[in-house]
Amino acid sequence: MLYGFRDWQPKHQTRERKFAQYQIEMVSKRTQAHYGYDEGQKPAPRRSERTRKPAVKVDQDGDSIASSPLSSVPSSPEPEKKTPAKRARANKDENATESKPAAKKAKTATATVIDDRQPGEIRYWLMKAEPEPRIEKGQDVKFSIDDLERLRTSTWEGVRNHEAKKNMQRMRLGDLAFLYHSNCKEPGIAGVMKICTEGYPDFTAWDKSHPYFDAKTKEESPVWHMVDVEFERRMERFVSLKELREYGDKELKGLALLRRSQLSVSPVSREEWEFIMELEKKVVDAEDS
């Protein structure tokens, strides 16, 4: 019997093909025996593919209580994603940028001056003025005890030193101050005046026509302050700077006028104030005798 070319195969290839078919059949039988289904039936789903049935609860009477299906059980929360380092730094820089205007505003705000005085306590000061004519931006800025006596009350503006400004902010109603003639031929104490208002913004600082105009100061964020003063009396005798210096290493060794001569507004202790008042009377008595 003759075979066609396609039907003819060597004997060793026929044996190999039969052996392979045998292995397939044996694997199929072992699989059916292991999973418990006959050929033609649908195999049981894998464990990972099975659908869990909702749990059934039983109450005290033995009745079943339907519980929520598995789909309603909240899944475990997803772990938080860590922000990349570059993005975290960018957010930090953005937050810092947003907080900059507040820091700038705080910088321009006037610092609070702490006043530790007792209730009803009166404090003493020395405030300088120029009694001789001096033209500044076309205006005469002179001010003397004669001017204050004529006006009775006056604003004390034009202070542009931060330490002097803080001293003015510490002033309270009823405080007393020496009016000191400065930048003249004979400087010294000319009279006594009373503080009649507490410190408030110096509006001359943003007045372009004023001799002490400050371009860096704005009305909405004032820097400089001033007070109002009232004439009390003239000194019985003009107490010169030269005379005050004679006591610079004794009773007046702590006087700010002698130690910090550049300050236009300086504090005076109670002891220093009383000594100068006694000095005034003592000198008058000596001259009369």
Image (spheres, grey):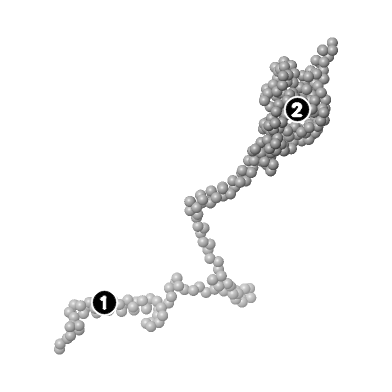
- The N terminus sits in image quarter: bottom left
> Residue 142, how many percent across, how many down?
74, 27
Q: Nearer the viewer, mark 2 or mark 1?
A: 2
Q: Residue at x 24, y 79 (%)?
A: 18
Disc 2 on helix, strand or loop?
loop
- Which quadrant would residue 176 be assigned to in this image? top right
Q: Residue furthest top?
A: 289
Tell me the residue that label 1 is attached to. Answer: 20
**With respect to residue 209, does 75 lie above or below?**
below
- Which quadrant would residue 244 be assigned to in this image? top right
Q: Residue at x 62, y 46 (%)?
A: 102
Query: Can the viewer see residue 242?
Result: yes
> Residue 59, how many percent across, how many down?
62, 73
- Which quadrant would residue 172 be assigned to in this image? top right
Q: Quick one: 22 or 186, which is closer to the camera?
A: 186
Q: Amino acid at mark 2?
A: Phe
Which of the marked residues, 2 or 1, is nearer the chain's N terminus? 1
| Left or right of residue 112, residue 147 in this image | right
> Residue 65, how many percent across, how many down?
60, 74
Q: CA gap, disc 2 to disc 1?
A: 124 Å
**With respect to residue 268, does 54 lie above or below?**
below
Tell me the residue that label 2 is attached to. Answer: 143
